[in-house]
Image (cartoon, rainbow, N blue to C red):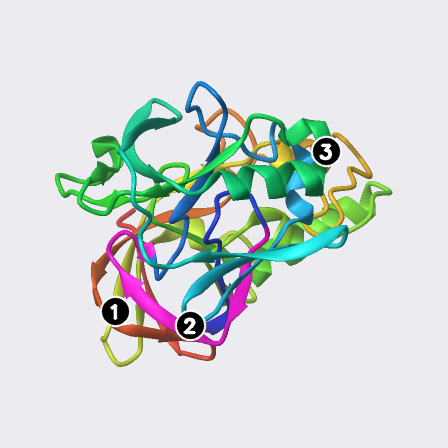
Amino acid sequence: MNISELNVYPVKSLQGIALEQTQLHEHGLAWDRRWMLVDARQRFVTQRQIPALATVGVALSGDALVLSHPDVEPLAVPLAEPEGNLRLVSVWDDHCKALPESDEVSRWLEASLGTSASGLSLVRFATDFQRSVEEDFLAGGAAHTYFADGYPFLLTTTGSLAALNDALVAGGHDPVPMSRFRPNVVIDSDTPWAEDRWATLADATGTFQFALRKPCQRCKITTIDQQTAVIQEPAEPLKTLLALNTQPALKGAHFGQNATLLKGDGAVIRVGAALEARERDA
């Protein structure tokens, strides 16, 4: 097996960036989910509420986060931390400290997306604050992340996507690309749902090691085209995932595994790296 894709999502729920290599950290890939959009109540906002967020492109230059949209000129947000008072923002049930970016970003978002973006602001995770991962699946360990839904890494496999797409096509539906699932690490593996049996995943040289903690329950974002924001089939691929029932003991549709880093903080991870899995004890 080897890594076929690496993806980082600097702004939660905006477009991702495909990388050939990047740095691993305990809180996730470098720059992953470092920023987030919030409403006037300082609650996180994603494609679940505004599908059009999928049309906002993201890039990282040497000194800026660059936002782009077909209807407006790109906007550069300095990577240097902004000055200003800390805010308390919420993502799911967690309250996190964050730094607000300039009001210029809010104006740019409304110019790009219209009234659906009214009242949104961009905040940056305050790195002196630590957001802990739920302890239930950490086997007595500890982990933390930035603005990801709950875990620092999401791992998926090409074999599982192929099996899902076979089922979609058999049901008369269009296949979906891996981008619908917004993974960080995609593993080239022929065996469908093999990741659900893995306890750990490490590179062949032993430089880094992931622990696969919890199946990822999927939501309506999987129905949204991650470039155009078009929802072609509102029920798919969730309905087909539910029918496949890959996690009989759990409610909902699942695809991929949430993971934490056991070894390799600061190491470089690359597309093409050979991987070795250890399966869970029976």
Whether residues under marks 3 and 2 lie with C-beta atoms below 8 angstroms apart, the answer is no
Which mark is drawn over residue 62?
2
Secondary structure of the residue carrying tag 2 is: loop
Per the picture, the main secondary structure of the magenta-coloured stretch is strand
Give the side of residue 12 with respect to residue 151, left or right: right
Badge nearest the viewer, 1 or 3: 3
Q: Residues within 10 Å of mark 2 (few under 14, many from 20)?
A: few
Q: Residue 161 location, x and y as percent? A: 62, 55
The residues tagged by marks 3 and 2 sit, at their Cα atoms, a distance apart of 30 Å
Precedes in sequence: disc 1 or disc 3: 3
The residue carrying mark 3 is 114
The residues tagged by marks 1 and 2 sit, at their Cα atoms, a distance apart of 26 Å
User: Residue at left 17%, top 45%?
Assistant: 128
- Residue 191 picture quarter: bottom right
Taking depth in this image into account, of 252 and 92 the one nearest to the observer is: 92
Quadrant holding the N terminus: bottom left
Q: What amino acid does circle 3 point to?
A: Gly
Q: Residues within 10 Å of mark 1 (few under 14, many from 20)?
A: many
Q: Up-down: is 20 above or below 200?
A: below
Magenta-drawn stretch contains 26: yes
Q: What amino acid does circle 1 point to?
A: Phe
* Region in magenta: 15-28
Magenta-drawn stretch contains 6: no
The answer to whether one can see residue 223 in this image is no
Give the side of residue 98 with respect to residue 197, left or right: left
- Residue 238 picture quarter: top right
- Residue 239 picture quarter: top right
Secondary structure of the residue carrying tag 1 is: loop
Which mark is drawn over residue 208?
1
Q: Up-down: is 262 above or below 251?
A: below
User: Residue at left 36%, top 37%?
Assistant: 150
Q: What amino acid does circle 2 point to?
A: Gly
